[in-house]
Image (cartoon, helix red, strand yellow):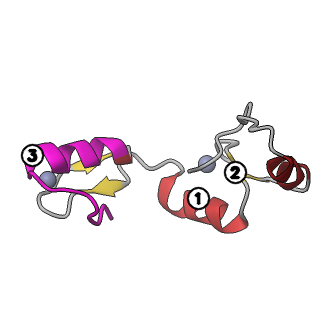
Amino acid sequence: MTFDGGAMPYLGTPMSKLFLDATQFFTCGKCQRKYRWKAALQRHVKYECGKEAQFFCSVCSYRAKHKSSLLRHMTGRHALRPPFSVY
Ligand SMILES: [Zn+2]
Ligand SMILES: [Zn+2]
């Protein structure tokens, strides 16, 4: 789950409040998406930002921009069941 900026759902638990208050976000310089972890931002820049299709079917040459699209493709087209690799 990535944090796309804007309002973050606030769960109201003391633990999440502590966590959020102490958190600094790493912002993508290209699209301004915010990430809690530097590693997540680096992954985003490397694999997501500016990329058209980032998820690839391992069975055929289908590409999807969103993981949910690929999951739907694999379950519908190939009758596969999660979990399976979507990279
Ligand atoms: Zn970006
Ligand atoms: Zn496929």
Which residues, given as a range, are shown in magenta?
68-87
**Direction from residue 17 to residue 72 in the image, left or right:** left
Of 12 and 45, the residue lying toward us: 12
- The residue under the point 91% across, 56% down is 22
Label 2 sits on residue: 28
Q: Is mark 3 within 8 Å of ligand 2?
A: yes
Q: CA distance from mark 1 to mark 2?
A: 7 Å
Q: Above or below — where is 62 with respect to 84? A: above
- Frontmost of labels 3 and 1 is 3
Residue 45: assigned label: 1
Q: Is mark 2 within 8 Å of ligand 1?
A: yes
What's under tag 2, amino acid-wise?
A: Cys
Q: Residue furthest left?
A: 78
Of 55 and 13, the residue lying toward us: 13
Tell me the quarter of the picture where residue 57 sits: bottom left
Q: Above or below — where is 25 with respect to 58? A: above
Percent position of residue 3, x then y: 65, 45
Mark 3 is surrounded, within 10 Å at the Cα level, by few (under 14), some (14 to 19) or many (20 or more) other residues, namely few
